[in-house]
Image (cartoon, helix red, strand yellow):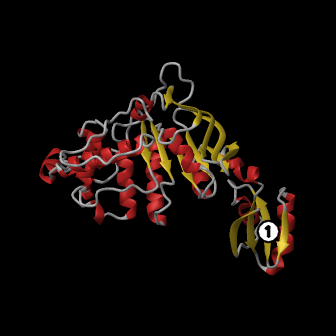
C-alpha cells in the first residue's frame, strides 16, 4: 500500500462503508475513490464547463503538441530504472527478475504474446501491484515515494471506463480535479489532441478511437514527462490505430519518455527506440528494432514474381549483389533486411527485370 497517496478516498454523506478485511486496503481505497469521484462528477454542470473552455476565436491558430522537455531529478541517472523486478500471484510467477533502464526521452516497447507479463510489468511500475525488486522513476522509489513518482507519470490503459453520461469537457475537468491539476489545461489538450469539436459530446457517443484519444488527453493533464501505455491500440481499427500512433509519434518528437506494451510486432518496430521481449515473465532480449527478427530467429522474406523467361537472369543478378535467393515456383524467394525490404526490387528494376508482383512475410 502506498504510504503517501496523492489522493485520499472518502465516502459521500449517506453512503454506508461496507466492512472490509484489513488485508484489502487497496480495494477499500479504490471503492472510496470511485464513489467520491462520481459524486464530484455529477456536481459538474455543462454550462460551467463550456464557459470555462470557450472555443478558439475565429481565425485563431490551434497549437500543435508542445510539452516541457523532461529533466532528470538530482541524482537520477535514467528516467526509469527497474532492477530484478519480480511479481508472484500465489505460486505463479508472472514476472521474474526483470531488469532494464530507460533514458529521458526514450521510447521502450514491451513485446510478447498474451500472458508474457507485459501488463504486470506496467502495473508494477505504476505501483498498483506489490512486487519485489527495485523500481525508480526519475529517482523516486516506487512505492515508497509513490506520490512523487505518480506526479510525473501519465497512464493510458488498454480500456478505460468513463462515465458514459458525462461530456468530453466534463470528463477532462473531472480528471483534472482528481489530479489536482489546473482545469485550464483542459482547454489546452482539447486543442492539441483535436478534441475541441467533440467537447460537448457525451462519452457514450464517441468512437473507440476518440475514447482512446480522450484517455491520452487525461494522461497528459499536468504535462507529465513519462507515459505508460498498456496495449493502447489493441481495440482500435486500422485507421484509428494509425491516427493514435501519429499522436504518440508527435509526443516522442517533443521528448516524452514512454513505455508501452503491444503484441503487434510491426507497431513495435516502427515506433520504439528499444524493444524488450518478454516470454513467460522473463526478459529474453533487449534490442534495437532492427535486431528483433535476428534475436527471435526469424527471417524476413520477399517473394518476387517476374516473367518466366527472366527468373534465371534475376536469380543471377540478385546473387551477384550478395542476396540469398532461390526459385519458388514462378517466383523468387529472397532473404532481406527487415528495414531494407525493397532493395532487391530496386536492383532488379535497375537491371531491366520486369517486376510483376511481390509479397513479404516473416518466417521462423
Q: x and y percent of residue 339 in the render?
A: 68, 53
Q: x and y percent of residue 179 in the render?
A: 31, 38
Q: x and y percent of residue 17 in the render?
A: 28, 46
Q: x and y percent of residue 148 in the render?
A: 41, 29
Left or right, 208 with respect to 119, comes to: left
Q: Which residue is mark 1?
A: 333
**Looking at the picture, does residue 259 appear above or below residue 213?**
above
Quarter of the image where one finds residue 363: bottom right
Left or right, 255 with respect to 214, comes to: right
Left or right, 303 with respect to 81, comes to: right
Secondary structure under the numbered disc 1 in the rendered image: strand
**Looking at the picture, does residue 317 appear above or below residue 103?**
below
Residue depicted at 85% across the width and 68% down the height: 326
For the C terminus, the quadrant is: bottom right
**Looking at the picture, does residue 173 appear above or below residue 79?**
below
- The one nearer the camera, 159 or 345, is 159
- The one nearer the camera, 356 or 154, is 154
| Residue 240 visible from this viewpoint | yes
Q: Tally the marks.
A: 1
Circle 1 crowding by C-alpha within 10 Å: few under 14, some 14–19, many from 20 = many
For the N terminus, the quadrant is: top left
Residue positioned most to the top: 75
- The one nearer the camera, 302 or 229, is 229
Residue depicted at 84% across the width and 65% down the height: 325
Residue depicted at 24% across the width and 51% down the height: 169
| Residue 61 visible from this viewpoint | no
Quarter of the image where one finds residue 153: top left
- The one nearer the camera, 142 or 109, is 142
Residue depicted at 70% across the width and 66% down the height: 361
Amino acid at each position: 500500500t502506498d504510504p503517501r497517496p496523492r489522493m485520499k478516498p472518502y465516502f459521500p454523506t449517506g453512503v454506508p462503508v461496507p466492512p472490509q478485511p484489513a488485508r484489502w486496503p487497496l480495494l477499500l481505497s479504490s471503492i472510496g475513490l470511485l464513489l467520491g469521484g462520481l459524486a464530484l462528477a455529477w456536481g459538474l454542470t455543462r454550462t460551467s464547463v463550456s464557459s470555462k473552455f470557450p472555443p478558439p476565436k475565429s481565425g485563431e491558430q490551434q497549437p500543435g503538441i508542445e510539452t516541457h522537455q523532461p529533466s532528470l531529478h538530482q541524482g537520477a541517472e535514467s528516467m526509469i530504472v527497474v532492477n530484478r523486478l519480480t511479481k508472484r500471484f500465489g505460486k505463479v510467477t508472472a514476472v521474474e527478475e526483470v531488469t532494464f533502464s530507460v533514458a529521458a526521452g526514450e521510447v521502450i516497447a514491451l513485446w510478447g504474446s498474451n500472458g508474457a507479463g507485459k501488463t504486470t510489468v506496467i502495473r508494477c511500475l505504476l505501483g498498483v501491484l506489490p512486487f519485489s525488486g527495485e523500481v525508480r522513476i526519475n529517482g523516486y522509489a516506487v512505492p515508497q515515494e509513490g506520490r512523487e513518482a505518480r506526479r510525473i507519470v501519465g497512464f493510458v490503459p488498454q480500456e478505460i471506463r468513463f462515465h458514459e453520461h458525462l461530456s468530453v469537457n466534463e470528463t477532462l475537468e473531472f480528471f483534472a480535479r482528481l489530479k489536482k491539476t489546473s482545469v485550464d489545461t483542459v482547454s489546452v489538450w482539447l486543442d492539441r489532441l483535436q478534441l475541441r469539436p467533440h467537447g460537448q459530446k457525451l462519452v457514450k457517443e464517441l468512437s473507440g478511437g476518440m475514447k482512446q484519444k480522450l484517455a491520452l488527453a487525461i494522461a497528459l493533464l499536468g504535462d507529465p514527462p513519462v507515459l505508460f501505455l498498456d496495449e493502447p491500440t489493441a481495440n482500435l481499427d486500422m485507421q484509428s490505430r494509425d491516427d493514435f500512433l501519429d499522436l504518440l509519434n508527435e509526443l516522442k518528437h517533443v521528448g516524452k519518455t514512454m513505455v508501452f506494451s503491444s503484441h503487434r510486432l510491426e507497431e513495435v518496430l516502427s515506433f520504439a527506440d528499444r524493444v524488450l521481449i518478454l516470454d513467460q515473465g522473463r526478459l529474453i532480449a533487449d534490442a534495437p528494432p532492427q535486431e528483433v527478427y535476428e534475436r527471435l530467429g526469424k527471417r524476413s522474406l520477399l517473394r518476387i514474381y517476374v516473367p518466366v523467361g527472366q527468373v534465371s537472369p534475376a536469380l543471377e543478378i540478385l546473387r551477384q549483389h550478395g542476396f540469398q535467393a532461390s526459385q519458388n515456383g514462378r517466383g523468387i524467394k529472397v532473404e532481406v533486411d527487415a528495414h531494407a525490404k525493397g532493395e532487391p526490387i530496386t536492383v532488379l528494376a535497375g537491371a531491366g527485370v520486369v517486376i510483376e508482383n511481390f509479397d513479404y512475410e516473416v518466417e521462423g
